[in-house]
Image (tube, grey):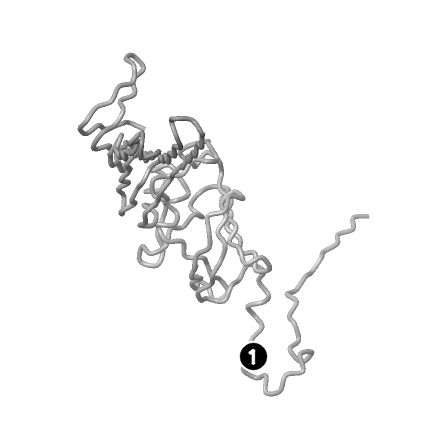
Amino acid sequence: MLLSCARYSSAVEFNSEFLNIDKNDDISLGQFAHAQYTVPGRYLLDISVNQRYFGSRTIEFMAGDKADESFACLPEELVATFGLKPPLMKSLPRLADGQCVDLRGIDNAAIKYLKNLGRLSISLPQATFEYDDPNYIPPAAWSDGLNGALLDYRVIANNRETNGPSGDSRSLQSYGTAGVNLDAWRIRADYQARQESGSQSQNLHGEAFQLNRLYAYRALPSIRSKLSVGEDYLNSDVFDTFALRGATPEQR
């Protein structure tokens, strides 16, 4: 005797009457029947790619082709910071008139909105990245930083008191680096200062200040190099390091 069994399942709907809400005719709970559905709108989320933190960013969720679908709109400038291979980056489909990069075009890619953590978790195969080094930062993620000034200094003070003919003597020395950050440029000056004084009979008085090195440099991300202008030191695998005055490009 042959027995055949069939299982039937039907969608489970939540009865809104349990909420005990007055005038709930306009309330629709259909969107909550889908675990990955997110109401379209803008959300401030933490971005992580393969468990690596990429900061907080406002992500817009847009409605999909179906009424019960939505997707996270990932701008191209954000995806460029992930370090994907350039050919792959160009081949990925765009959504919403080119505003969003669709990472679902990558096999085995996963994008999950962890609502309880306020995090957008993105998982991508390692083969999609340009470099294997997890600490690599692509040029699209580089920043010129903030404009400002800095002073790195060291001060040495000496005071000598004697009863002999040489008398008392005092000295104050300082050396370090002063600098200014202006957009992509970094301006630096290595300085050295000295002040000495002693008894009037010995006439030991003196002040001195000099700049040992004055230079400016900046990164050139497009050619992965650094440009230095001013007084700099040239490093070579063949010759000894020596000082020069001018402009020197350096490959990174």
Left or right placement of residue 85 versus residue 113 in this view = left
What residue do we see at 28% from left, 13% from top?
Answer: 239
Q: Please determine whether, in this image, residue 252 is positioned above or below residue 14.
A: above
What residue do we see at 56% from left, 79% from top?
Answer: 27
Q: Secondary structure at mark 1?
A: loop
The image quarter in which residue 89 lies: top left
- Furthest toward the left, the residue is 246
- Furthest toward the top, the residue is 238
> Callout 1 environment at 10 Å: few (<14), some (14 to 19), or many (20+)?
few
The image quarter in which residue 211 lies: top left
What residue do we see at 36% from left, 34% from top?
Answer: 173
Quadrant of the frame with the C terminus: top left
| Place of residue 114 in the rendered image (x, y in percent of width and height, measured from the top left) | 56, 56
Question: Disc 1 marks which amino acid?
Answer: Ile
| Place of residue 187 in the rendered image (x, y in percent of width and height, measured from the top left) | 26, 40
* Total numbered labels: 1
Write down the residue under mark 1.
27
| Place of residue 217 in the rendered image (x, y in percent of width and height, measured from the top left) | 26, 36
Left or right placement of residue 32 versus residue 134 in this view = right
Q: Please determine whether, in this image, residue 206 is positioned above or below residue 181.
A: above
- Viewer-nearest residue: 252 or 168: 168
Left or right placement of residue 55 versus residue 16 in this view = left
The image quarter in which residue 206 lies: top left
Left or right placement of residue 21 versus residue 170 in this view = right
What residue do we see at 75% from left, 52% from top?
Answer: 4
Q: Please determine whether, in this image, residue 32 is positioned above or below residue 101.
A: below
- Viewer-nearest residue: 159 or 98: 159
- Furthest toward the bottom, the residue is 23
| Place of residue 14 in the rendered image (x, y in percent of width and height, measured from the top left) | 65, 72
